[in-house]
Image (spheres, grey):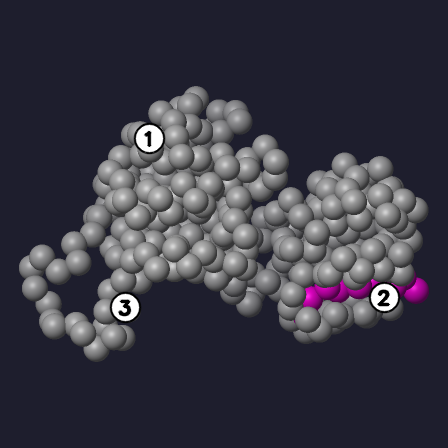
Amino acid sequence: MKKILITRPLPDEVLDLLSGFDLVVRQENTPLGNDELRNALREFDGVLPTLGDAFSADVFAEVPAPRCRILANFGVGFNHIDVKAAAGAGVVVTNTPGAVTDATADTAMTLMLMSARRAGEGERLVRSGNWAGWHPTQMLGLHLTGKTVGIVGMGRIGQAIAKRCHFGFGMSVKYVSRSPKELDFPAENLRELGLLAGQVDVLVLAVPGGAETRHLIDADIIAAMRPHAHLVNISRGDVVDEAALIDALQRGTIGGAGLDVYEGEPHVPQALRDLDNVVLLPHLGTAAREVRVDMGQLAVKNLQAFFAMKEPPNRV
């Protein structure tokens, strides 16, 4: 019987599917520590890791001949796993695309609305007991209907966000992507990120994490944004130069921001927390029970296929 490590508690519906394995479920909700990462490779046939479980090149270098043969990642993003190093050690890496698409797109829309309409700031005002009542110029925000959204990364999630914007809010869609997309709604493909940043009312980030996209949104791109525009990030925290964003928000050179991810997650700088013109969510992207169950089921299917000597459906 294959021995499998689950690095975080998962819904019972997912664990029930793994009855054919010798299962160890770690009860902590924090990322694996250094020793745990190495022991996971040494002591288990397969691991179901998730965000923060940093299977880096250094980890694989210290365990060059691991017992573990598959890392069935719980999540679509896998920048915490060095896939090249894993392959060099003979370890397959899989992920869970598809299951997360709509939930993450919904979170992007939540952040767009909250940021544009100052919803977080408004709730804090009501909770403080200092709300003096409605008046015509109270907390005036940005009306989203009919505006222009810019999507950075037009993959599954980017397209789902764009559809919601176009069909739900009548927004014009512009985007940058590694290649032009065939879409069932009008969208303008711009080749330069800086050009996109300067033409939209909301700039939404939907790219994978990793070295190629680290600080993709830097001080220059933020400076190119229009003064009323909002930045929304549901991808990975280090896609944005957080210091540059804080500076822009402090100076009021952009309209605001909505963030579900952070560069040093779970650390959120005090300077960011002190600002009223940014909405801060605790990485809620896929936080719906049915979505997490679906993600777990995909991860399990990858494990089951691999150990049945079949091609995992979601190899990365």
Eye-nearest disc, 3 or 2: 3
Asked if residue 34 lies left or right of residue 242, the reply is right
Q: Which residue type carries mark 1?
A: Ala
Mark before the other along the chain sequence, 1 or 3: 3
Percent of width and height locating residue 307: 86, 53
Q: Which residue is mark 3?
A: 123
Q: Is residue 4 magenta?
A: yes
Mark before the other along the chain sequence, 1 or 2: 2
Q: Which mark is residue 285?
A: none
In the rendered view, tell whether residue 186 sits above or below residue 128. above
Q: Which residue is mark 1?
A: 224
Instruction: Give the magenta part as a residue range.
Output: 1-9
How many marks do you count on the picture? 3
User: Mark 2: which secondary structure?
Assistant: loop
Q: Which residue type carries mark 2?
A: Phe
In this rendered view, identify the residue nearer to me: 245 or 51.
245
User: Mark 3: which secondary structure?
Assistant: helix
- Residue 40 is drawn in which quadrant? bottom right
Mark before the other along the chain sequence, 3 or 2: 2
Q: CA distance from mark 3 to mark 2?
A: 47 Å
Q: CA distance from mark 1 to mark 2?
A: 53 Å
